[in-house]
Each structure stands twice: as C-alpha cells, then as structure tokens.
Image: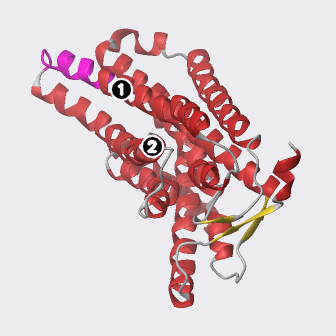
Amino acid sequence: MASIHNVTEFIFLGLSPSQEVQKLCFVLFMLLYTAVVLGNFLIVLTVMTSRSLGSPMYFFLSCLSLVEICYSSTTAPKLISDLLAERKAISLWGCMTQLFFMHFFGGAEIFLLTVMAYDRYVAICRPLNYMTIMNQQVCAILVGIAWVGGFVHSFAQILLIFHLPFCGPNVIDHYFCDLLPLLKLACSDTFLISLLIVANGGTLSVISFVIIVASYVVILLHLRTRSSEGRSKAFSTCGSHITVVTLFFGPCIFIYLRPSTTLSVDKMVAVFYTVITPLLNPVIYSLRNAQVKKAMKKLWIRTMKLDEK
C-alpha cells in the first residue's frame, strides 16, 4: 500500500497536442455533452409526464437515459475542462473515483440493456401475460438488480486496480482514468490482474451480449407464426434496442477483452462509447418511436402554453 502513494497524481496527454485542435474539440465536445444531457433528460421528463408512456418498456427507457447522463458525466466534464488547460492533471483519489463511477454506470447500463431485452421477449412472446409478469414491483426489482450489478462490477474492478503500486511515471496517454492505461503504469507484474479484469469486465460484456442476442433469436423464431403486420410492429419496437446494444457493446468488447495491450485507436473508441453513444440513444429511440415523438410534442405544447400564461 505504501508504494501506491509514490504517485499522488496522474497527467493526461489528452486527445491531441495541438492547441488549435484542442480549442476546436472544446467547442465540439461542449455541444455534444450539452446535447447528451438535454436529450436524455428530455426522454426522462417525457416518460414521467406522459400517460401514454406508462408501459414497462418506457420505464426502462427513462432509466437508461438517466444512466446515460451519469455515465457521460464521469468523463466529459473533465475532458472539456482539460481541453483549455495547459496541465491536464488528476489526483490519485480523483482517478480512482472516476474509474469507479465510470464502471459503475457502465455496468448498470449493461445489466439494464439485458433487462430491456427480457422485457421485449415477454412483450412479444407472452403478450397476454405481459402486464402481469412485468408489473411495477418486478420492474423496480429488475432496475435495482441493474444498479447493484453495476456496483458489484465496479467495486471488483477498483479493488483489482487500487492495490497496484504506482511509483512512476505518471503520464497517461488518454483523456480519463481507465483500466488499460493504469495497468501500463503499474510497477509490478499485471498479468494476473489483466486476466481478472477480462473475467470481470470483458466476460460480463460478452455474456450479456450473448443473452441479448439469444433473446432476439427466440423472438425471431416466435415471429414466424405472426402476420406480416405483427412482425412489422414487433421489429419496430425491437429495432431501436438492437441498434443501441450494438453501438454500446461493440466498443466495450473491443476494449475490455484485450487488457494486456493498448492501441492508438483506443481514445477514439472511448470517445464513441462515452460521448457519442449516450448522444445517439435518445435520437434513436425518439426518431424510431411514434409514441415517444407524439408524447414529446404534447410536452412541448404544454410547456409553450405555460410560458404564455
């Protein structure tokens, strides 16, 4: 434990050494992060205030949007502020805190996306019992399991990395604290830790992804007996979720199934799953869902009427 405190802070190299590029990125990421927060908050507010969006699917969607805001907020604000700073530093404890909450919210999102796949399975394969099976208590328990699962996943990750000795150097070739860059800076053999990280992070992503894919295989087999209109309606409700799952799990599996090495593209991939994907989620769900668009329109009309008064 004593050797950990030889390094009291870490220095980020950031996205680019060019000042001009950093200023451009500051404007770009400020706009993107603002859109992430406002877009996902709009979905949460729309689901909470609309009676037509009272089904479990939209409850899970609002929970996902809340997680997206939290997840993006673990890295984006620090990235934005560092783009205007000459010295991009973070304390050891700040680094561990960022690492914990990033994997906490990321793990919660993985479990939540799996829960949403189960919800679609019940809705399509057992429609007559849907509201009985997915009642309010069950939905609350499933969301609670997602949060607890995210916490356990993150706690295990931080436990693995926290006891590593960091005695220098302290320069991280990234824009936030993550497992792979920190493993490179550790002053000890990290082979076993790397395997444990794969078992915890990478395997979790793969198993959850396989479960989600399996649920949709069952759904597709079940839809063979449906009419073309029924299949079209089912595909429209599942298409958004499949798109979001692909956008989120693809980069995560790419990053966390090879913890022993880092690649030059890792920072760009990280930008995608920490900023771009949380931004795309509300766009995907609102543009592909007529009920969400209708509810947003009603919310906008009510807001304008209140402003007029």
Residue of label 2: 258
Q: Which mark is residue 83?
A: none
Residue of label 1: 210
> From the image, which quarter does the C terminus lie in?
bottom right
| Residue found 47% across the figure and 11% down from its top | 133
Residue 122 rendering spot, x and y as whole percentages: 37, 16
| Residue found 54% across the figure and 38% down from its top | 109
Crowd band around label 1 with a 10 angstrom C-alpha radius: few (<14), some (14–19), many (20+)? few
Circle 1: residue type = Val
| Residue 63 makes an appearance in the image | no
Residue 220 part of the magenta segment? yes
Query: What secondary structure is the stretch in magenta mostly built from?
Result: helix
> From the image, which quarter does the N terminus lie in?
top right
On the rendered structure, is 210 left or right of 164? left
Nearer the observer, 180 or 185 = 185
Residue 4 against residue 37 in the figure, above or below: above
- Which residue in the rendered view is the most extreme toward the bottom? 20
Mark 1 or mark 2, which is nearer the start of the sequence?
1
